[in-house]
Amino acid sequence: MKKTIIYHTKKHLSLITCMLIASGVLFIGVCTYLAVTPVKGYSPAAVTKAASLPATVVSSRYDINYPVIHDKKIDTLLRSYASKQVTDFTTKLGKDVHDPRNRMTLDYVLQHRGSQFATVLFTQREYLVNSPVRTERVVKLFDIKKQVELSPKDLFVSESDAQVFIGALLYDYFKQYAAHDFTQEQFASLLQLNMSAIHNIALTSDSIVLHLNPKNPASDQDIQTIAIKRSLLDSVLQPDYTNDDGGVDVPLVATYTISQQPKQADNIDPNQKMLAMTFDDGPGNYTNKVLDTLRRNRSHGTFFVIGRQVPKYADVVKRIVQDRNEVGNHSWDHAFLPVLSHDQLAHQIDDTQGVIQQAASGYTPTLMRPPYGATNDDVAGYLQQKQLHVALWNVDTEDWRYPDAQAMYDRIMQSAADGSVILLHDIHPTSVEAIERAVPALVAQGYQLVTMSQLERYR
Ligand code: ZN
């Protein structure tokens, strides 16, 4: 069905600068001609008198365009932005403000307008005598429901987590699809993935788009846009911004489009020590805390989940996978497998695989940790048939026995060694507290915290 809603109109300002002498003080002001479309209420503070030059002369120096999206507050913000760009430009010109060769244009694309948010991409060009043309792109994001302008940090649950997450995603993507040979840190700084430096995150119906300003402002050539499907960012975006808001997009030609999770780049240094933290008996109420800790420390772990728990915590299981951790099968309800019939065993194993696949978009575990580590020939045979490897541990913290965060932290730190597989439980608050402290401490000691499958590959 064709959409007939008109979401915005275009405003065009023709402006000239004029100098006013008032009370012996020199003001450089912006005088406006409302040449094409009158904009009611447009009155920069410094203007006291309209200039008398014909509008045609005027518009050849300043060609200022901005959208009107028919929300009073947001339209005021857009108009103020456009007028401020002119004011800033004339201030920068100083005494050269009279030279008619100095020109500026501001144009825009209303990239998205829906019921929740609007994205405006401004392109500003400055033509100065004896200077190359300067081009800058600025994205303005607005929450229409809240009637406010958004900054990138408003989009994310945690700015720093989003930075790490997006940095890792881009790193994996470029590692896989382009022959870039830089480290994750170099890459993040290359893309200015310091959120305070990114003013240019746009939202469209199904993506976030990073607009990178050209390295050489004189040229449009190396302006790059990276579109990332929002579904890949569910775990870091604020819930308000995870869904399509039914809006209209201007078709976007992105330099790079990331529409599926890139294969995780193997960023492990085999010559550095590594260990695998494993978290059993979840998912539960504390699993997200463990995930936050791992993400913050660029670390990974393996979660051996109980099938019965998975539907209730489907989002958590999805996030475990999205954060590039490993999910393992830990039976349906923590059964003692050696005493079960074939059918009961099949239920314990297969139904757990099924709910994990359902929660995590088809992700299929390859590791099984039998509860209590208990197997026999029948169990081992069945797992082999299902292409599941038995995954035990070599350090048991016995965290269930000692609900004491300090003692647990000490045990983790004392038992840590290259190649350790540490058994923990993410269902006890004291364990989670110990994990929150131990992860950064281990990383500081030079450990790479990897998944069990990664550890098996290298140790
Ligand atoms: Zn268990």
Image (tube, rainbow, N blue to C red):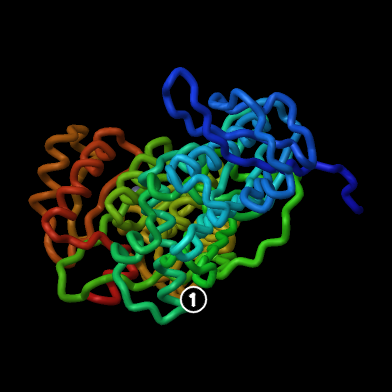
Front in this rendered view, residue 40 or 54:
54
Helix, strand or loop status at disc 1: helix
Count of numbered badges drawn on the protein: 1
At a point 30% along the width and 33% down the height, the residue shown is: 429
Viewed as shown, does residue 454 lie left or right of 334?
left
Viewed as shown, does residue 413 lie left or right of 14?
left
Q: Is residue 146 above or below residue 157?
A: above
Viewed as shown, does residue 117 lie left or right of 17?
right
Q: Label 1: which residue?
A: 385
Q: Quadrant of residue 34?
A: top right
Q: Looking at the rendering, in which quadrant would you find the C terminus?
A: bottom left
Q: Is residue 70 above or below residue 277?
A: above
Front in this rendered view, residue 291 or 261:
261
Q: Is residue 318 above or below residue 86?
A: below
* Residue 220 in the image, given as x and y percentages of width and height: 54, 68
Which amino acid lies under the numbered mark 1 shown in the image of this protein? Gln
The single residue placed furthest to the bottom in the displayed view is 179
Q: Residues within 10 Å of mark 1 (few under 14, many from 20)?
A: few
* Residue 407 in the image, given as x and y percentages of width and height: 12, 37
Can residue 205 be spotted in the picture?
Answer: no
Q: Quadrant of residue 419?
A: bottom left
* Residue 370 in the image, given as x and y percentages of width and height: 37, 58
Can residue 105 be spotted in the picture?
Answer: yes
Viewed as shown, does residue 288 lie left or right of 404?
right
The single residue placed furthest to the top in the displayed view is 23
